[in-house]
Amino acid sequence: MIKSIEIKNFKCFDKLELSLSKLTILAGANASGKSTVMQALLLAKATAREKGDSVDASEALGVAVGGPKALISQNRTEVLEGDFQFNIQWDETVVAFTYKIDKLISLKLAYDQSGSVPDNQLVYLNAERMGPRISYPAGIDEEILYNGANAAFLIDRADMQKRKVPRCLALEKETLNFSTQVENWMNAILGDINFSITTDYIKAITDIRYGNEVAEEPVLPTMTGFGISYILSIVTAGLWCSSLNNVSLLIENPEAHLHPAAQSRMGKFLECLADAGIQVIVETHSEHIIDGARIQAALMKQTDDIRIYFFSKEKESIHVEKIDVDENGELLEWPKGFFDQKSQDLRDLFQIRREHASH
């Protein structure tokens, strides 16, 4: 498990230190550094797998960087051997990654790595996941793609391999069949969902059809909302990771396209994954994700395993505050700006009502 990360001179941070847990939640304002933490972990992962002497930043992050200079903090306060640095602790092992801009190849970063990274797998789902399509790619290497595009294929593949879901994550104990458990969790989060999957290995595509008790015939994903397709990749990735050892699952905006009730249930699912031994690191703008996670943690008496960080902007700097959760799932701090918009809106409505009543 990744125990901690220290970031120096990277993007918006001159220095940031975070301790990570079984479930770590990054919340806060837009453009306040949450994605930067995710990207630091992704870049370190790509570096650890690199065989050469430089790493492609755009390829590692899965986005167009534009140029490595965009990765360097403009508020550097510490002189480093390179342009920016990460110190990451896996259990008892700390590895330092130091990066320098390659002057000859603009998208390449020269790097120095102290020590070897322990056997830890990192799975990442970004915010721009693949929505409804007529069919999905198949035959790709057996790992989750950043956009979750091959989720349907992996469900089919897992059944072919007789890959099982751990009993602690099985909603139906009679069968640990992978596709059945994916369907069960889809039902638990969204309600009344079933699907069928077929893969054409010649065309390298996987077809999925969705149904429910109301529909007489299964329909194409394009005839459903985005929420179903977006949630499929998260549930599949989570259960797929449960069959692996020593894995960290990074998810951006798991709440996307979900009703608030489904967001809360998604938070509970993420906490269940963490309790099953998967390290989960989440970036979210949803109070319902946090509420669901802390409710589930309190029910399982695992609130010590949750880390919540609130990112906010203060003038020209980024402030990161840790929010503790007690044994009852209650938040021990509630910083200004931390999901308090509803209270502010209600106060505004109350003031409007008072002004109207006075006229």
Image (tube, grey):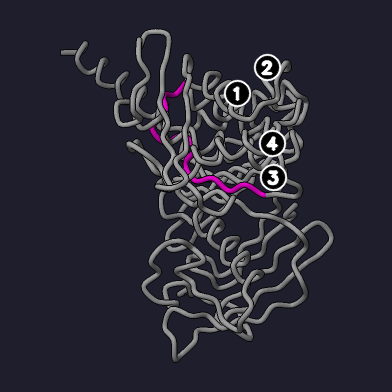
Residue pushed farthest front? Answer: 202
User: In the figure, is residue 189 to the left or right of 149?
Assistant: right
Picture layout, residue 330 above or below residue 7: above
Compare residues 109 and 24 and report the one nearer the observer.
Answer: 109
**Sequence order check: which comes first, mark 4 or mark 1?**
4
Write down the residue under mark 1.
Answer: 180
Write down the residue under mark 4.
Answer: 163
| Disc 4 versus disc 2: nearer the observer | 4
Q: Are marks 4 and 3 in contact (CB under 8 Å)?
A: no
Seen at 44% across and 86% down, the residue is 105
Q: How far apart are the alpha carbons under marks 4 and 2?
A: 16 Å
Quadrant of the rendered image containing residue 259? top left
User: In the figure, is residue 28 to the left or right of 345?
Assistant: right
Which class describes the residues within 10 Å of circle 3: few (<14), some (14-19), or many (20+)? Answer: many
User: In the figure, is residue 91 to the left or right of 347?
Assistant: right
Report the number of numbered marks. 4
Write down the residue under mark 3.
Answer: 279
Q: Return the x and y of residue 80 as percentages of the image width and height.
A: 62, 83
Q: How far apart are the alpha carbons under marks 4 and 1?
A: 11 Å
**Sequence order check: which comes first, mark 4 or mark 3?**
4
Which class describes the residues within 10 Å of circle 2: few (<14), some (14-19), or many (20+)? Answer: few
Compare residues 221 and 69 and report the one nearer the observer.
Answer: 221
Q: Return the x and y of residue 318 as percentages of the image width and height.
A: 50, 58
Q: Are marks 1 and 2 in contact (CB under 8 Å)?
A: yes
Mark linked to residue 172: 2
Mark 2 belongs to which amino acid? Glu
Mark 3 belongs to which amino acid? Gln
